[in-house]
Image: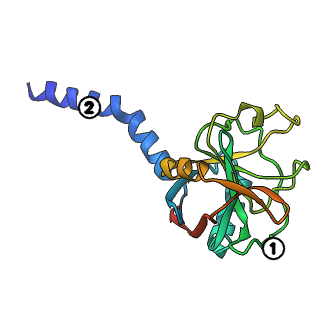
């Protein structure tokens, strides 16, 4: 009977091994907490899929770049974008752009975090966006043939993302889709690495 229990215990551990491995892999992903004026958003990053995008984002987080920035572009049924402008609407200086990593297999689905860029595929700097719907048109190779690089996902605070998405917007300083009341990223901190 004792051998049977040991064998059953070993079988149970073996059966659970993939779950433990997946849990350990998830724990190894860097996590960043964005404290916003509308609530907290926690994002998990995927360096194994988008190493340059994740390293770039983490460098900006650690340097304090995102502290005091706003979500400056909010389009219901599409996405919320931030990371580039201070509360007074001034564009923040950035480092050199990074190469596009849109061919990594990650899709622009609800809650995913992606790098914002211009029409130049290799132009992403500090700005990022959070998809509020499934945006297959942004996946590689759709759209402009390059897509937008997903590098993380919201794991806590999707309700906050949806609240931000629902905020009334206006045109200000030549930019459209700007929230009427500024939505501030008060701080961005690495909470697990």
Q: Nearer the viewer, residue 150 or 37?
A: 37
Secondary structure at badge 2 equals helix
Residue 3 against residue 189 in the figure, above or below: above
Looking at the image, which residue is at 63% across and 74% down? 68
Based on the displayed image, in which of its 4 quarters is residue 106 positioned? Answer: top right
Q: Nearer the viewer, residue 72 or 107?
A: 72
Looking at the image, which residue is at 70% across and 35% down? 135
Q: Which residue is mark 1?
A: 93
Looking at the image, which residue is at 28% across and 27% down? 11
Give the number of the disc on residue 10: 2
Q: Earlier in the sequence, mark 2 or mark 1?
A: 2
Q: Residue furthest right?
A: 120
Q: Is residue 139 left or right of residue 8?
A: right
Looking at the image, which residue is at 69% across and 68% down? 60
Q: Are marks 2 and 1 in contact (CB under 8 Å)?
A: no
Tell me the CA gap for discs 2 and 1.
56 Å
């Amino acid at each position: 009977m004792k051998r049977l229990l040991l064998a059953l215990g070993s079988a149970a551990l073996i059966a659970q091994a993939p779950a433990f491995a997946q849990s350990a892999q998830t724990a190894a992903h860097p996590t960043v907490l964005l404290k916003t004026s509308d609530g907290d958003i926690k994002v998990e990053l995927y360096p194994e899929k988008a190493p340059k995008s994740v390293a770039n984002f983490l460098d900006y987080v650690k340097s304090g770049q995102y502290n005091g920035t706003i979500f400056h572009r909010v389009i219901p049924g599409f996405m919320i974008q931030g990371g580039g402008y201070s509360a007074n609407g001034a564009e923040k200086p950035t480092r050199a752009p990074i190469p596009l990593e849109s061919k990594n297999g990650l899709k622009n689905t609800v809650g995913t975090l992606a790098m914002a860029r211009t029409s130049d595929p290799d132009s992403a700097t500090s700005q990022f966006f959070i998809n509020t719907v499934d945006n297959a048109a942004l996946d590689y190779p759709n759209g402009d043939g390059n897509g937008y690089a997903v590098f993380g996902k919201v794991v806590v605070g999707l309700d906050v993302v949806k609240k931000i998405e629902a905020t009334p917007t206006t045109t200000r300083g030549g930019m459209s889709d700007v929230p009427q009341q500024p939505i501030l990223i008060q701080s961005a901190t690495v909470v697990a690495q």
